[in-house]
Image (spheres, rainbow, N blue to C red):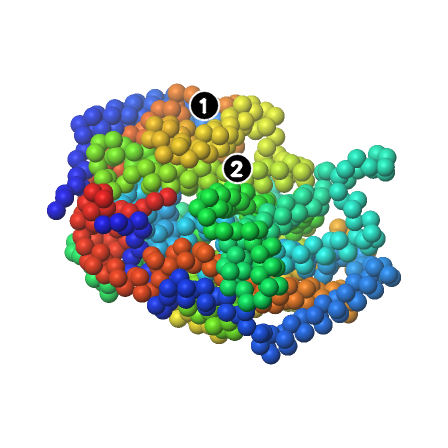
Amino acid sequence: MASIKDQFVIPGKMKTWSYSLIGVGLVALLAGLFTKGFSKDEHEQAVFWGTLMYNTIFWTLVCNAAMFFICVTTMAWGGWQQSFRRVPEAISTLVPIFGSITFVVLIYVVFIGHNHHIYHWIDDAAVEADPILKGKKGFLNTKFFLVWTTLAITLWSVLGWRMRKLSSEADQAAMDHETGASFIKRNTVVAAMFLVWFGLTVGSTIPWLWMMSIDAHWYSTMYSWYTFASSFVSGMSLIALWVIYLKNKGYLEYTNQEHLHDIGKFMFAFSVFWTYLWFSQYMLIWYANIPEETVYFKHRVQGPYKGIFFLNLIINFLAPLLILMKRAAKRNYTLVTFMAIVILFGHWIDFYQMIMGSVSKEHVTLGWLDFGILSLFVGLMILFTGKALASKPLVPKHHPFLKESILHHT
Amino acid sequence: MSLLKYESQLREPLVNGNKTYAQVTEDIVRPIEAKPSKLWYIGFYISVALLMFGVYSVYREVTYGIGQWNLNKTIGWGWDITNFVWWVGIGHAGTLISAILLLFRQGWRTGVNRAAEAMTIFAVMCAGQFPIFHMGRVWMAFFVLPYPNSRGPLWVNFNSPLLWDVFAISTYFTVSLLFWYSGLIPDFATVRDRAFTKLRKRLYGIASFGWTGSTKHWQRHESLSLVLAGLSTPLVLSVHTIVSFDFATSVIPGWHTTIFPPYFVAGAIFSGFAMVQSLMVVVRKVFALEDYITIGHIEAMNKVIVLTGSIVGIAYLTELFMGWYSQNKYEGYTFWYSRAYLFSPYGWSYWGMMACNVLSPQIFWFRKMRRNLFVTFFMSVLVNIGMWFERFVIIVTSLYRDYLPSSWSVYYSPTVWEIGFYMGTFGLFFTCFFLFAKYFPTIAIAEIKYVLKTTGESYKADMTAIEKESASDFAHKVHAH
């Protein structure tokens, strides 16, 4: 009986790194709070809270995308991902944590800070004077915002927790045909519930509510699917990073180049898919040239965000397209690591321009605060993913499809 | 041990019964060699009759002009473009199955890919008729091709999505045809090798390009398939994306919406799978191919239908929501009056669409329903009716009342020649499909043989010993090997 390194032990170095990153992040957070958050200038306040918003929303959606990956592969009866499925599971444990941060930040912006520089529609006087915003009150109102935000984050967390709990059953005892079949079935039911809820939130309402409503007049039916694509390709990249990290430490013996190749395919394919949605949204608005719609792109293409606008396309489309297209690239640990970091950074920038491009139209504020807050979230992500990985075996050794994953050829 | 591929016994076999390679060939080629049944002749003649009716309808349109149809101001596009988009949409499933499902390694595609690809090609042929004959002066149709010409500065309009359609659809058609045909070559050779008359041997010999089944042939065949799959994948998305641009680049309320491209693609796959289901439920019965197109195959396709139906549902609701959220009066009027208000002139068509496309496929959440052939067939027809209404709703409800109330049009209903043209494309489609089913192997023989030893029922039964092994023992064996 061959035994494998199945129990992740958090290395000291990882702890040091995560605590240092969190430390840097907290310093930046406090500095930001005192220089901008407490500033008398409403614009400065908006920049501070906007920076927190796009970071926390980005990381919440990225970690939720890891659970989306589990649920989608479960529904499709996938076998290949079983050998490393504990990685996306571990990442998804961050949904309640980052979700709570998102909740606190959003509730502060809407209810305590009354930051109408961010959400114009919470300013009652302005809404009364503006027939368009008045007309939107059925959706853009603080009560609905509170209820829907709470519900979204709670259900993502609860359903994700159910999926992880089910997954633990595969650690306990060998399954025969019948128990295996019922195990798969119960997984499918929870995964289906997650996906339906995902469609009703990430696939539609949540990006409208949290992000699109910053430009309270503007609208685009593509917006939510675009946001989803951005977060999903980042989620795949994050999974790739952790898989490679664990491989380098000698874990995940059953996972090999074949699996990495397939994760790489997802990173490649969904980078192209993101670009497809990007192009569809941009081209249609450009072609029709209606001022109500082009207003969104005006300062992004021709104003201060011009550099970021094109950078977004280069790192999120051209780089993955050219670098990840070849088979050898997707099987190369170093290259996939590099590209995963590029893609994660690229879509963080994408979220930056989606939110800050609307909060601060006149100036690009990208600076120490952004990277400081990013450091806080990366630190938290490393800390809690590491803890989750260490909390149970890295391989669900009795999962009925695990053997398919062991003998996987791409 | 030498184990190259292993599949859990929890997965249903893709080939039922105790089949050998010879049996597979026998089962699939038999219908080609036998005389067609009475049912085949009846079906074929009905199709040809429909086709003839279509030809006559088109003859009237070409001779007397577009006035033979009931298009009017402001409904310049009616049944013609509805039918065009409908057929193009149907023509998406084949290439999705052969290319995208290949990339996703869905083994069940082998049972249905051949027929689905054939259907794709016939559907695109039908689709092409509508814009061509809508030109009116069809003898000028070659004007859509951009080439240095004697018409002076008269070029095609490169800014128009209608022209992009010409490129997208002709490319898609070409690649799909090549893909389909390259898969057929080894199977034609199989038919040739069994031929019992000289003529048969000759014809299938030509069709198979002298295939010998040598390793070199297979190697080239495999690399070609991969290249074509790579090319087809973006093409599957591009065609309906560009069809959606026909509408979405405009500033017409209800047409100009950014979600159109992915939503059209999802809808196209949805209707394409429905058409595959309609055909497969019949084909497997008539040609006794139940062991190859199993209930498991039908179930898998029904899952795709409930998935794409729900994606389309989210898109419908997104549009409807934005019709209100945008607070744009024209969008609001189109979505909430012309479409969603049941008692507006065309309100019935919107709710027909919603019922067929969004509500009814939800029964496929239940396994029993997914595996019921009667329900599957009924639903597949319903979905295609719904998808026809979707295009009708988009086109007609956005056009019949434009910005200028004085030009609002009267109620539009098609003439008999308009309907005849549509019926004629059914004739064309089924004539082609009947011929295909008679003369071509309806299932990819070589591909079934490829998956037989890992997913065939009798072979899977042999894997019980492996099934009982622990993961670490299994891994040890695999890697030691």
- Residue topped by disc 2: A275
Q: Chain of mark 1?
A: A
Other-residue count near label 1 (Cα within 10 Å), few / some / many at <14 / 14–19 / ≥20: some
Which corner quadrant holds the C terminus of chain B?
A: top left
Q: Amino acid at mark 2?
A: Thr
Residue at point 20%, 59% (across, down): B465
**For residue A245, what is the image quadrant?**
top left
The amino acid beneath tag 1 is Leu
Between A12 and B284, which is closer to the camera in this rendering?
B284
Residue at image point 21% right, 62% down:
A176
User: In the figure, A176 relative to B99: above or below?
Assistant: below
- Disc 1 element: loop
User: Residue B261, how many percent across, how many down?
Assistant: 58, 47
In the visual, does A265 lie left or right of B53?
Answer: left
Quarter where residue A254 is shown: top left
State whether residue B435 appears in this view.
Answer: yes
Looking at the image, which residue is at 63% across and 45% down?
B171
Nearer to us in this view, A221 or A295 = A221
Q: Nearer the viewer, residue A68 or B218?
A: B218
In the image, taking residue B129 as reference, residue A259 lies left or right, namely: left
* Left or right, A371 with reference to B406: left
Residue A40 is tagged as none
Query: Looking at the image, which residue is at 27% across and 50% down?
Result: B3
Q: Farthest residue to the bottom: give it.
A: B38
Q: Which residue is mark 1?
A: A366
* Whole-percent x, y for residue A330 in the image: 39, 34
Residue found at the far left of this picture: A1
Judging from the image, mark 2 belongs to the subunit labelled A
For the question of whether residue B325 can be seen, the reply is: no
Q: Position of residue A195 (x, y in %)?
A: 40, 53
Establish whether labels 2 and 1 are both on one chain. Answer: yes
Q: Is residue B400 above or below residue A218?
A: below
